[in-house]
Amino acid sequence: MSDHVQRGAAPEVDAVDEKLPGGRLFTLGLQHVLVMYAGAVAVPLVIGGSLGLPKDQISYLISSDLFCCGIVTLLQCLGIGRFAGIRLPVIMSVTFAAVMPMLAIGANPALGLTGIFGATIAAGILSTLLVPLIGRLMPLFPTVVTGVVITSIGISIMQVGIDWMAGGKGNPEYGSLRYIGTSFLVLAFILLVTRFTKGFFSNISVLLGILFGFGVAIAMGEVSLDGLSEAAWFAPIVPFAFGWPTFDPISIATLTVIMLITFIESMGMFLALGDIVGHPASRGDIVRGLRVDGIGTIIGGIFNSFPHTSFSQNIGLVSVTGVSSRWVCVMSGGILLAFGLVPKMSVLVASIPPFVLGGAGIVMFGMVLATGIRILARTDYNSNRHNLYIVAISLGIGMIPTVSGNFFQQLPAQLQPLFHSGILLATISSV
């Protein structure tokens, strides 16, 4: 904890409960949304694109995701009675850790999207019930294990960004030089914005890179805006829009373990964020925060979205902006919810070609990988050389599904979601 917090002095950033003037509150809330927006819509784009869904269904997944992000953010920052969250400046979003397991579930013809939603709902219920026990599991997750988990998340999802750069899976022109070239152009643009701008524009460099690439793709004639004119300006998000959920035991078990893994990440984020804003998180605070992660996952499954978590990027957001008022994130939650009710916006996002997202994906997914490496750098490899074996073996096992998709093909189909998750394999190995 910083010295000024230990002495009881006021923190350098705004107080957590400070209510800012309406105009500034909206401006800061919108800024936070723009910073987090690219990450918020990435998962529905990955799931929809990888499963070959039509644009209208992908756009509905995006709307549902934004809608759920808004609701769960409001629960985390504001809360309702016993459903109050940690009440720190936290914006919620879909976890990247569940992407590869969900793709394995969705690829099963007997399950598809409804299998993903069913597993999400059940995993949310089970993980919520397990929240009080999570504190007792902390000794199983020292720095070396946490670092392996987050690194394996980055490795697993990086293949999605690489596929995007080449034009997306299933594209007959996969690997076209114009796709790869445009992706690297987007990546270069993001790096230039990050290098030569500060503050707000630097924070939204990924979003600006996507907008730049979208403009380039339009000039190349690679963008189809079919369905944009027909999309409504306003439409509600309805539960089970893709059909009644399918509950598969193995899929449920897989996503439940993934949720427990994300709980560990969220716990670390809560502790770090509480320290930054001068509001140290107690065990009760953490339990409330994790409970909202679980409840948010239930809400996500019901409203056609995916497992939700407290984004670790909140730490960077608060550190860079210097704003710690949770009311800013309450405003952000309201804006996200409103965005989810505007189908035209979601259709526009769904129209972005994969190769445009490729350059941005390398940055977004690479940051997850870099975070894991940074945590592993804090591991003691000198006095405890066993840590080196833990990292080497766990990451090696975790990479099996990434480098050899057919490695487990002889196993029963019901077990595929479990063994096709490099994150899960790496976590079990490291623990």
Image: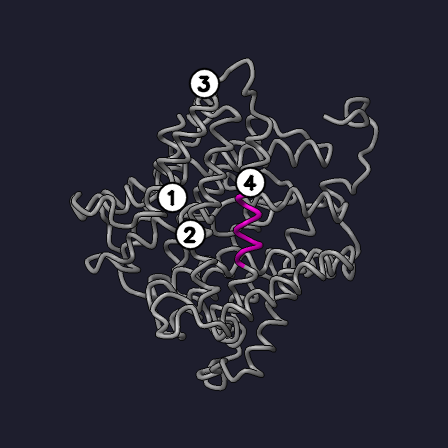
Residue located beneath label 1 in the image: 124
| The C terminus, quarter of image | top left
When asked about the image quadrant of residue 4, the answer is top right
Quick check: 372 left or right of 11?
left
Pointers 1 and 2 in contact (CB under 8 A)?
Answer: yes
Q: Considering only order in the chain, which callout, 4 or 2, is on the residue closer to the N terminus?
A: 4
Q: Earlier in the sequence, mark 1 or mark 2?
A: 1
How far apart marks 1 and 2 lie (CA) works out to 8 Å
Viewer can see residue 287: yes
Residue hosting label 2: 299
How was this image coloured?
A: one colour
Taking the view exactly as shown, the residue that stands out farthest to the top is 383
Quadrant of the rendered image containing residue 204: bottom right
Which badge, 4 or 1, comes first in the chain's sequence?
Answer: 4
* Residue depicted at 47% across the width and 48% down the height: 95
Q: Nearer the viewer, mark 3 or mark 2?
A: 3
